[in-house]
Amino acid sequence: MILRTDGSVKRILCILLVLSTIWGCSSYQKETAKETLAFSVLPISSSLLGLPIQIVAFDSVLLVNDYYGDTLVHCLSLRTGGEITKFGVRGSGPNEVMPPLHLLKTPDSLFVLSRPQWILYTVSGTPRVHLEKKMRLPVAVSLLFSLGDSSYLASGMFPDKRFYIFDSAGKEKSRFGDYPNFWSRENDLPIEVKRMFHQVRGYGFSIKNGFALADSHVLSLYRHTSSGYVLSKEVLLAPYEYDFNVNGIESITKLKPSFATGVIDLAVSDEFIYVLFDSNIKDTSSKSKNEIWRYDWDGNLLNKYVPNVDISLITVHPDGTLIGLTGEEESKIAFVKF
């Protein structure tokens, strides 16, 4: 017996095929019970920090990228919490930089990106730190990280794609990546609007796995292939909708107040992806602690943790320790090893 398919059946089969393709690279996470996560804490001097926006850990040092202050990068001891040194004098003169900065650590080097100046500096010298210009980028870049092959991946307010790759001299090699479309109205919005809402809030790179990044509500995973970096999965962390004003490069977006605030930061190891998530609804007065959601590199949610302290930034030490900075008035360094 031969089963004949009419036009309507064929259309249904085509729709199912398209949906299966979409589900293969994007998903919404399952509900997971929340667990308590106990960090050990190490006090630091509250007078050191203004508004930290990034932390980086290596050896026995924690670098704190501070938005305020005359000196913008603090080097703290992970053993004592004391300040080892500081660098990055605010200004436009020799050996000075303009904030906001972005810190970039490779296995053998440390760099500072001055976002307003579009300049990447090499950091060298101890105890007196010197900044040497490495390259000027041809476009405004918000985040930059090394891909381990003398090239750099950047995100920013680009006119067409989400990411650019530059070589070690700052010359563009390629561009790729589209913005998420988990909200139905986004399909018809111009890129200037979507790039404002989906700005990267945290990222991490693994030579073994590729790179992970998160905007406020979406986790995106990319793997390296023979043709370049390819999106392997997108995970909707929480639903979102936003109000917007279409005005070209000056377009404005604002999350609607009935939705969770979303991602604060992201950090990775070769085994796990950690998302620091603010689940508070914007139109409520109560405030719960930021949570830490742990994923594997296939985008599967493994755990949702509620820390014993309120964590404002996270990073992963090369030894696998998850390190946080608390958001209290007197900041502390927080540690937990899985």
Image (cartoon, rainbow, N blue to C red):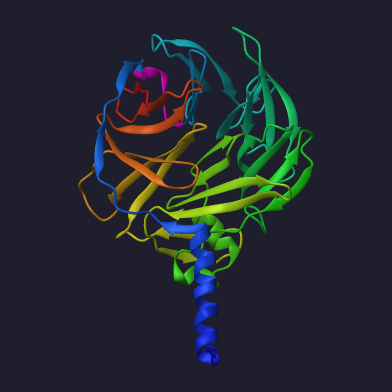
Q: Farthest left residue?
A: 286
Residue at image coords 48%, 20%: 319
Residue 99 in view: no
Across and down, in percent, residue 112 comes to 62, 28
* Residue 129 lies within the magenta run: no
Residue at position x 29%, y 52% in the image: 31
* Quarter of the image where one finds residue 191: bottom right
- Total marks shown come to 0
Q: The magenta stretch spans which residues?
A: 46-53
Nearest to the observer: residue 145 or residue 316:
316
Left or right: 87 in relation to 51: right
- Indicate the position of residue 87 as horizontal and vertical percent values: 57, 18
Image quarter hosting the C terminus: top left
Where is residue 242, by image quadrant?
bottom left
Q: Relative to the observer, which residue lies in front, 137 or 208?
A: 208
Q: Which x, y percent locates residue 327?
A: 33, 31
Residue 92 vs residue 280, the one in the foreground: 280
Q: Is residue 51 placed above or below 18 in the rendered structure?
A: above
* Relative side of 188 to 235, left or right: right
Question: Is residue 100 placed above or below 139 in the rendered structure?
Answer: above
Is 237 situated above or below 35?
Answer: below
Residue situated in front as seen by the camera: 254 or 10 = 10
Residue at point 57%, 32% (across, down): 101
Q: Name the residue located 51 percent from the left edge and 77 percent from the top edge.
A: 15
**Residue 208 visible:** yes
Q: Is residue 182 above or below residue 217?
A: below
